[in-house]
Amino acid sequence: MQIEAGKELVSSFPFRIGGDLVFRETAEAAASFYFWQRCGFAVPGIHEACHLDDARIPDQLGGGHRNVTGGWHDAGDYAKYNGYTPHSVYALVSLARMPDSPLSLAARKQVLDERSGALNSYSRCGSPEKASCTAMSAAPSTGTATGDSRKRTRTMSGATAMTA
């Protein structure tokens, strides 16, 4: 493409245009991003296993601890919002199962591995006896935390009491 800017002719780099071209050329990279967002797992070259002591249940909901390690960090900020996990899993599995999926076979396998890990963590988040959580907060319930959030026990800040 060339554009005339004043007396100057400016050329862009070559690019293709197509109906679903952006989707097809970015789908595999987007799906693989979930691997880099893994929580409770050592991601080579990114971080060691983190948040291995999740999560404290607030006293007003009965107190205690629940192992909800796993899942994904949210937006690279080391917080985990489990309420979005089912949507992410659905989108990933739908992408992997598309008859003409742009994912390679290796990427499809990776997507299904991500699904299993996320659902395993998510399934441990609810308990009829105590509480269900939708979010993990790196900050303690008494105020703002400092230091490396990957090494702190997180409070189930989105916890709600379960009702029958």
Image (cartoon, helix red, strand yellow):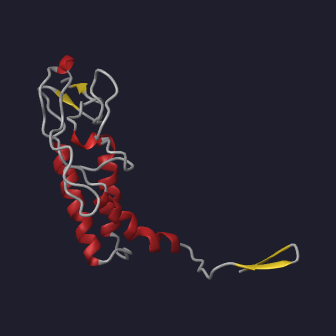
The front one of 11 and 106 is: 11
Residue in the image at 35% along x and 66% along y: 95
Q: Is residue 144 left or right of residue 38?
A: right
Q: x, y percentage for residue 70?
A: 19, 49
Q: Left or right of 64: which side holds 48?
A: right
Whether 104 is drawn above or below 38: the answer is: below
Position of residue 113 relative to residue 51, above or below, is below
- Residue 17 on image: x %, y %: 60, 77
* Residue 98 rendering spot, x and y as whole percentages: 35, 70
- Residue projecting furthest to the front: 147
Q: Quadrant of the N terminus?
A: bottom right
For residue 153, what is the image quadrant? top left
Q: Residue at x 60, y 80 (%)?
A: 15
- Which residue occupies 39% across, 49% down? 75
Residue 38 is drawn in which quadrant? Answer: bottom left
Which quarter of the figure has residue 9?
bottom right
Q: Nearer the viewer, residue 61 or 93?
A: 61
What residue do we see at 23% from left, 58% from top? 115
Q: Position of residue 14 (x, y in %)?
A: 62, 82
Work out which quarter of the rendered image holds the C terminus and state it.
top left
Q: How many numbered marks have been drawn onto this rendered protein structure?
A: 0
Give the farthest residue toward the top: 60
